[in-house]
Amino acid sequence: MKCTAPRKIQLTSLATIVLACFLTACTSQQMNDSVNAMSQKAFEYKLAELTGEASEAPDYKAIPIETAADQNWFIDLAYRYYSKDISQGQFIQEGLRRFPGYGESFAILAGLLVE
């Protein structure tokens, strides 16, 4: 019987450690999900403000984002810049590749996205 009690304690301790690790991982994932959701909401709010703010700039000319593909492309590009995955220069260059002649407009949008 003496052998059974220590083994039971060891198994219980191991189970506690495994459970603690599992809970820590879940908490970290939940934390990441919460941060991502807050970042996404902040981005959506900023994007909603963007058109009005940009149109007030004298050098801004509306970028002809007319198709769903163009909209998806722009949202992806803007989010990558907003979340600092790409630089301002990359944001403008990618914009110019898709919409040549709108460099000033992309520069204005870049300034407004990261205020």
Image: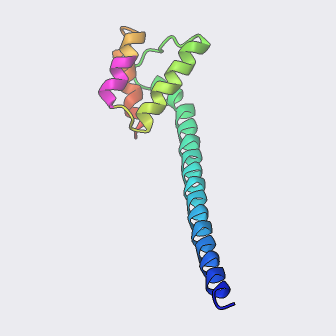
Residue depicted at x 66% and y 81% = 8
Whole-percent x and y of residue 11? 63, 75
* Residue 63 in sight in this render: yes
Horizontally, is 24 left or right of 110 in the view?
right
Which residue occupies the extreme top position in the image? 100
Whole-percent x and y of residue 100? 37, 8
Quadrant (top left, top right, bottom left, bottom right) of the N terminus: bottom right
Query: Compared with residue 40, is residue 15 higher up or lower down, i.e. above or below?
Result: below
Residue depicted at x 46% and y 25% = 77
* Residue 58 in sight in this render: no
Magenta stretch containing residue 25, yes or no? Answer: no
Give, as a single range, the part of the protein colored magenta. Answer: 87-94
Magenta stretch containing residue 90, yes or no? Answer: yes
How many numbered marks have been drawn onto this rendered protein structure?
A: 0
Quadrant (top left, top right, bottom left, bottom right) of the C terminus: top left
Horizontally, is 25 left or right of 55 in the view?
right
Residue depicted at x 36% and y 13% = 96
Magenta part, dominant SS: helix
Q: How is the image coloured?
A: rainbow
Quarter assignment of residue 92: top left
Query: Compared with residue 8, is residue 15 higher up or lower down, i.e. above or below?
Result: above
